[in-house]
């Protein structure tokens, strides 16, 4: 998986980069054998407009895989918590898409099976 990391009003340190890469391994495993075809763009930085509550961090992932686009954003009090939250959100979205594809495949197979049974009877 090609990974592009961008820092908005924030310099991405090596420690944060390593933390992000370890968290994104779960996304890469979920994509399976075609993971090397995926493009993952990550934006990290301070969230705008939250200065009253102290520092608020934002993480955003744009994932392009096999002509599908998935986007997730999250905010938290620390950069690591924001990374964890956005990883969980992107995995949830990928799981939902996988379930939809599986359901459509089963529906199509069921329709085809019904058509084949009708042809046997006639």
Image (cartoon, helix red, strand yellow):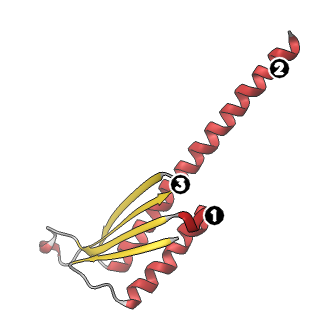
Residue 66 at x, y = what percent? 53, 54
> Which labelled disc corresponds to residue 32?
1
Q: Nearer the viewer, residue 7 or 23?
A: 7
Report crowding for label 2: few under 14, some 14 to 19, many 20 or more residues within 10 A (C-alpha): few
Q: Which residue is mark 3?
A: 66
- Does label 2 or label 3 sit earlier along the sequence? 3
Label 3: state its secondary structure.
loop
Q: Compute the Cα span from label 3 to label 1.
A: 12 Å
Report crowding for label 3: few under 14, some 14 to 19, many 20 or more residues within 10 A (C-alpha): few
Q: Is residue 106 left or right of residue 65?
A: right
Q: Compute the Cα span from label 1 to label 2.
A: 35 Å
Label 1: state its secondary structure.
helix
Q: Is residue 27 left or right of residue 82?
A: right
Q: Which residue is mark 2?
A: 117
Residue 87 at x, y = what percent? 45, 67
Where residue 70 sits, quadrant-wise, is bottom left
Report crowding for label 1: few under 14, some 14 to 19, many 20 or more residues within 10 A (C-alpha): few
């Amino acid at each position: 998986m090609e990974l592009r990391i961008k820092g908005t009003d924030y310099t991405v340190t090596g420690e944060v980069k390593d933390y992000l890469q370890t968290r994104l391994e779960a996304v890469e495993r979920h994509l399976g054998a075609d993971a090397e075809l995926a493009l993952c763009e990550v934006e990290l930085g301070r969230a705008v407009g939250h200065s009253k509550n102290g520092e608020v961090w934002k993480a955003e992932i744009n994932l392009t895989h096999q002509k599908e686009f998935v986007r997730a954003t999250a905010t938290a009090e620390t950069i690591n918590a924001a990374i964890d939250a956005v990883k969980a959100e992107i995995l949830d979205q990928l799981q939902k898409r996988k379930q939809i594809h599986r359901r459509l495949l089963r529906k199509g197979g069921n329709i085809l099976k019904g058509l084949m049974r009708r042809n046997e009877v006639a």
